[in-house]
Image (spheres, rainbow, N blue to C red):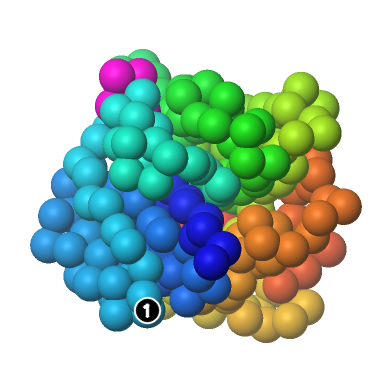
């Protein structure tokens, strides 16, 4: 009997993380569900993965804290004796500094970079020897913000740009055993934007995004999860790629899709 593979998905209580965890479970992976605040939703994500046939672990942890990252890796190894995939999805932002830099203080900037960029690095470091042993894969959930320099705040843009640069470096550093790629979604139809700018603001941004992109549509969490799954469980000759999931936003129409601007 072939041993099941094991994956860690950070920030997997809701949105892209939850969709990715479920996609991996449906593909035959056992999955570690990680959350920092949304315990009830994390349990729902865990239940969905179990229903799909996966063995699961549910762990609270802040990826900005190195000890928490090491604990996630340790827990997965203790349970499954292997880590085949790491999906660095946990992320935060602040919408206060989108159009008003004075609203973004240094502590908030550092916190965003700490979770998004440093957290990604710390998770890779914690899991690296185990991923190398399994010839595994890493997918970093970045953003079009890091590729195009647009987004909810300059701190978020900087953090995602750092993830993109790290992805390229890690792809070289961890080859040939580990493939490292990133997905860079544009607008995602999840509660992320609604929580940040309200339902009315979200509707306005979404309409502008749809007008300003060649394909005229935003990503769903499932769209992103599908791309992540391909990079994890297929794409055997693909490494060091920043996959833009933006409906062609990078081809033009940027002004209409920038949050906080008319």
Farthest residue in the right direction? 237
Count neighbours of disc 1 (C-alpha within 10 A) and say few if under 14, some if 14 to 19, many if 20 or more.
Answer: some
Front residue (pair 8, 240): 8
Residue at 50 percent across and 42 percent down: it is: 83
Residue at 54 percent across and 73 percent down: it is: 27
Determine whether, in the image, residue 102 is placed left or right of residue 166.
left
Q: In this view, does 120 lie above or below 149?
A: above
Q: If the image is split into quadrants, where does the N terminus sit?
A: bottom right
Determine whether, in the image, residue 109 is placed left or right of residue 241.
left
Front residue (pair 54, 113): 54
Q: Is residue 245 shown to the viewer in this render? A: no
Q: Is residue 73 shown to the viewer in this render? A: yes
The majority secondary structure of the magenta stretch comes to helix
Determine whether, in the image, residue 183 is placed left or right of residue 9.
right
Residue 37 part of the magenta-drawn span: no
Q: Give the range drawn in magenta.
A: 64-69
Q: In this view, does 108 lie above or below 237?
A: above
Q: Which residue in the structure is indicated by mark 1?
A: 52
Front residue (pair 221, 111): 221
Residue at 65 percent across and 45 percent down: it is: 137
Q: In this view, does 133 lie above or below 261?
A: above
């Amino acid at each position: 009997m072939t041993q099941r593979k094991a994956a860690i998905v950070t920030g997997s209580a809701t949105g892209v993380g939850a969709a990715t965890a479920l996609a991996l479970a449906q593909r035959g992976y056992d999955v570690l569900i990680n959350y920092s605040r949304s315990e009830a939703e994390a349990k729902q994500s865990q239940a969905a993965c179990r229903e799909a046939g996966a063995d699961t672990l549910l762990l609270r942890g802040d990826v900005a804290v190195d000890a928490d990252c090491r604990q996630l890796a340790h827990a997965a190894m203790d349970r499954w004796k292997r880590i085949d995939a790491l999906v660095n999805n946990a992320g935060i932002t602040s919408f206060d500094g989108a159009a008003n830099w004075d609203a973004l203080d240094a502590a908030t900037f550092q916190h965003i970079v700490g979770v998004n960029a440093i957290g990604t690095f710390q998770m890779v470091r914690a899991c690296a020897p185990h991923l190398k042993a399994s010839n595994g894969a890493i997918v970093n959930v970045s953003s079009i913000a890091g590729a195009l320099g647009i987004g909810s705040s300059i701190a978020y843009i900087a953090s995602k740009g750092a993830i993109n640069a790290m992805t390229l470096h890690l792809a070289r550093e961890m080859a040939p055993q580990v493939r490292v790629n990133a997905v860079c979604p544009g607008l995602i139809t999840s509660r992320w934007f609604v929580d940040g700018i309200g339902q009315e603001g979200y509707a306005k941004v979404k309409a502008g995004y749809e007008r300003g992109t060649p394909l005229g549509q935003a990503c769903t969490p499932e769209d992103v999860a599908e791309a992540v799954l391909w990079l994890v469980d297929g794409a055997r000759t693909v490494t060091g790629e920043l996959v833009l999931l933006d409906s062609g936003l990078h081809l033009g129409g940027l002004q209409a899709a920038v949050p906080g601007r008319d």
